[in-house]
Image: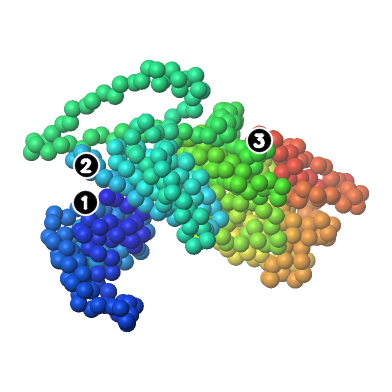
Amino acid sequence: MADPMCGVGTFLVEAGMIAADIAPNIKRERWGFSAWLGHVPALWRKLHDEALARAEAGLAKTPSWIRGYEADPRLIQPGRNNIERAGLSDWIKVYQGEVATFEPRPDQNQKGLVICNPPYGERLGDEASLLYLYQNLGERLRQACLNWEAAVFTGAPDLGKRMGIRSHKQYSFWNGALPCKLLLIKVTPDQFVTGERRTPEQRQIERENPVEVEVVERKLNKNGNPIKPEPVVVEQARLSEGGQMFANRLQKNLKLMGKWVRREGIDCYRVYDADMPEYSLAIDLYHDWVHVQEYAAPKSIDPEKASARLFDALAAIPQALNIDKNRVVIKRRERQSGTKQYERQSAQGQFLEVSEGGVKLLVNLTDYLDTGLFLDHRPMRMRIQREAAGKRFLNLFAYTATASVHAAKGGARSTTSVDLSRTYLDWARRNLSLNGFSDKNRLEQGDVMAWLQANRDEYDLIFIDPPTFSNSKRMEGIFDVQRDQVELIDLAMARLAPGGVLYFSNNFRKFVLDENLSQRYAVEDITAQTIDQDFARNGKIHRAWKIMARA
């Protein structure tokens, strides 16, 4: 028996006790019935002695093959301690390992039972990790446990359907308030649900013309022991009809953008943006990682249908994009208040290096809602790189200073990046250092409005990409881009050198540029010029203006 997600070994100990004929609670010393008037101590001692004798005889037998595998290293020793307390150390072995690596002993033609209770998932983003966990479990069963049986106790029965293998029996249970199912599975090819979806006519032809399975003679080594066979390439679990439709759209988009991506020299871009309304996701490729943002479904959408569609999409993504399941990150995008979108959501601290327009940038796909790189502003960053040569560049609300890196790459005389967050300025410093830029690139921590009021320097090129709303504790008052736009632009224009250019952009869908600005400055709406091919379906992703002093 094997448990590929054994935790602290509960199933393993239970199996070992059954195999060794050890009665439950045999080591217990106090029982409630001891004070019962009808209790007969002599009869109880006789039963207890018989149980002890059976346990002793059971433990004297050749131990059964019972193995546990657990990905979390913190649980290995507690599991082993539990096994030792049960007196089953010779019977049960526990190893650290992921589900995708667990393997029984096919080299000895061994058959048995795989039993497990996968985690239920409690945090945002667990949907993807759970789906891929079930898919990995199904792949390992089909690859390493052929002709075994499996029992999966799950709090997410819908995910059990995505293992690529049918259950022949199901039993319903309650784990506290959580409805669960025990799925019983025979790991035989006729139960596999893999490969491409087939029409009823194709399935009928397959039934009438079954493919004969070639029997391969087992090879032996020089000692006469069987040689472990080469790993078999396992077919992916079959996608649902909706999942296949979604995969087709992803592959179509990928093909359409292929030439453009190679020509532009970028390896991070949006490949899908709610193209199909029922699959309301934004999917971005970052080199060989996928960043998925699920837009919160309207209240009118049945939550179960929304969940099923999400699982359809998540199942399709690795297959359609040819990406490792472990490199898919999912987040839920909802209306944010204050600085919530900039708050830390995780603490993995894993940074990924990506390329864009000849510069290298660091992104973090897990720790924050945003990744450190706004993909939709790529054309604006490239414009800044083209225009920055010999100029003094000012980047307000700089975030991770990606625009400053592009300006430095374009030959800017100097760059100054202002942001309120020390975390993002540290990130900005790493972005600049990654490209070999340092001393002439200033990083200033402060409230942008207050900083502009105090600053007396001149700049030839200014970029402002403010948040829609900010109420950080480090700033006085509250910033509202619609309300405060005139004051912000006036302060920035006061710092603009003669002949200089200010680029102003923001992502607030309802934003309206104040008419007074057009009367005082030369203002040009350049939004259409700042939307790249990967955001062409969403022309309202941001607005952008070029602002100069009137001649």
Distance between mark 1 and mark 3 Cα atoms: 50 Å
- The reply, left or right, for residue 418 in relation to residue 66 is right
Dots 1 and 2: beta carbons under 8 Å? yes
Q: Is residue 171 visible?
A: yes
- How dense is the environment of label 1, judged by Cα within 10 Å: few (below 14), some, or many (20 and up)? some
Q: Nearer the viewer, residue 129 or 443?
A: 129
Residue 254, quarter of picture? top right
The circle on residue 276 is: 3
Q: Which residue is mark 2?
A: 110
Dots 1 and 3: beta carbons under 8 Å? no
Q: Amino acid at mark 3?
A: Met
- The reply, left or right, for residue 115 in relation to residue 463 is left
Residue 248: x and y in percent read: 56, 29
Q: Residue furthest front?
A: 38
Closer to the chain start, of discs 2 and 3, is: 2
Q: Is residue 353 visible?
A: no
Question: Does dot 3 land on a helix, a strand or a loop?
Answer: loop
Question: Does dot 1 land on a helix, a strand or a loop?
Answer: loop
Q: Vertically, is 218 above or below 410?
A: above
Residue 418: x and y in percent read: 67, 60
The circle on residue 45 is: none
Distance between mark 2 and mark 3 Cα atoms: 47 Å
Q: Amino acid at mark 2?
A: Gln
Residue 394: x and y in percent read: 69, 55
Q: Which residue is mark 1?
A: 65
Residue occupying image coordinates x 74% and y 56%: 468
Residue occupying image coordinates x 60% and y 47%: 304
Residue occupying image coordinates x 54% and y 43%: 311
Distance between mark 1 and mark 2 Cα atoms: 10 Å
- The reply, left or right, for residue 1 in relation to residue 405 is left
Q: Nearer the viewer, residue 517 or 224?
A: 224
